[in-house]
Image: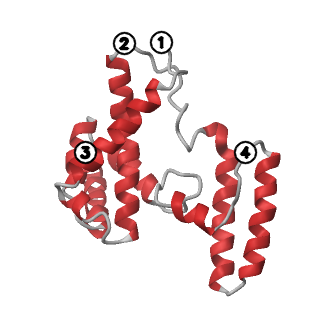
Amino acid sequence: MSDKDELRQLMRTAAHEWLHNYWILKPLGRNMWSSQNMQILNETAADLAGNELGDEAFEVLGNTTVNSYRYDSLNPGNSHLVRILRETRTVVEEMLENGEIEKAEQYMDKQLWNLKLGGYNIRKLNQAYFAFRGNYAESPASISPIGQELRELRGYFDNVGDFIESLSQIGDYGQFQYVLNLKRKQLFINK
């Protein structure tokens, strides 16, 4: 069985949800709703580690992961989607801050048309779309730096288990940034 079947995505989703259950007993999960950054950190960490755990489980069951990007929202093949959604979110947020609500709605309609021309069948592009998908920093709709920060932090650990345990002890976004900076300094010192 190859990763063209849906079992791989099922394993990733199960691992994602399991991580939420594991972390709810730890500072990361208990503080998920304390700020938007903590919600984004929690959801994105569950995506990142859940994908890795799900792929490991998929392979343990005797399957092969042919395409590591198959289910990734930041798949290099989706660069058009990522570019348009992030540009749209940035421009629309600026318009809304300036009170240009009607102009923002018109801009989103125009960008929706561009996405449809690119083959992306998004039914409606509005603030609700960005609000829901923006909690996952790896989503094309997100403009948060947390996804890149989490990927960097993951690179400092030899295995996903140590990464998961380290994250579990983080109670706020400032602490997360402290841990990331500490890992950066350790890498610099060890060079």
Disc 2 to disc 1, how far (Cα)?
8 Å
Which residue occupies 52% across, 60% down? 132
Mark 2 vs mark 4: which is more N-terminal?
A: 2
- Using the image, determine if residue 74 lies above or below residue 95: above
Specify few, some or many for label 3: CA neighbours under 10 Å numbering under 14, 14-19, or 20 or more: many
Disc 2 to disc 4, how far (Cα)?
33 Å
Specify few, some or many for label 4: CA neighbours under 10 Å numbering under 14, 14-19, or 20 or more: some
Q: Are marks 2 and 1 in contact (CB under 8 Å)?
A: yes
Q: Are marks 1 and 3 in contact (CB under 8 Å)?
A: no
Q: Residue furthest front?
A: 123
Find disc 2 in the rendering and name its residue.
62
Specify few, some or many for label 1: CA neighbours under 10 Å numbering under 14, 14-19, or 20 or more: few
- Using the image, determine if residue 120 lies above or below residue 60: below
Q: Are marks 4 and 1 in contact (CB under 8 Å)?
A: no
Label disc, if present, on residue 120 of the rendered structure: 4
Disc 3 to disc 4, how far (Cα)?
33 Å
Disc 3 to disc 2, how far (Cα)?
24 Å
Mark 1 vs mark 3: which is more N-terminal?
A: 1
Give percent across and percent down for residue 119.
77, 42
Q: Nearer the viewer, residue 178 or 163?
A: 163
Q: Nearer the viewer, residue 125 or 84?
A: 125
Which residue occupies 63% across, 60% down? 86
Which kind of residue does numbered mark 4 sit on? Answer: Tyr
Which residue occupies 38% across, 30% down? 11
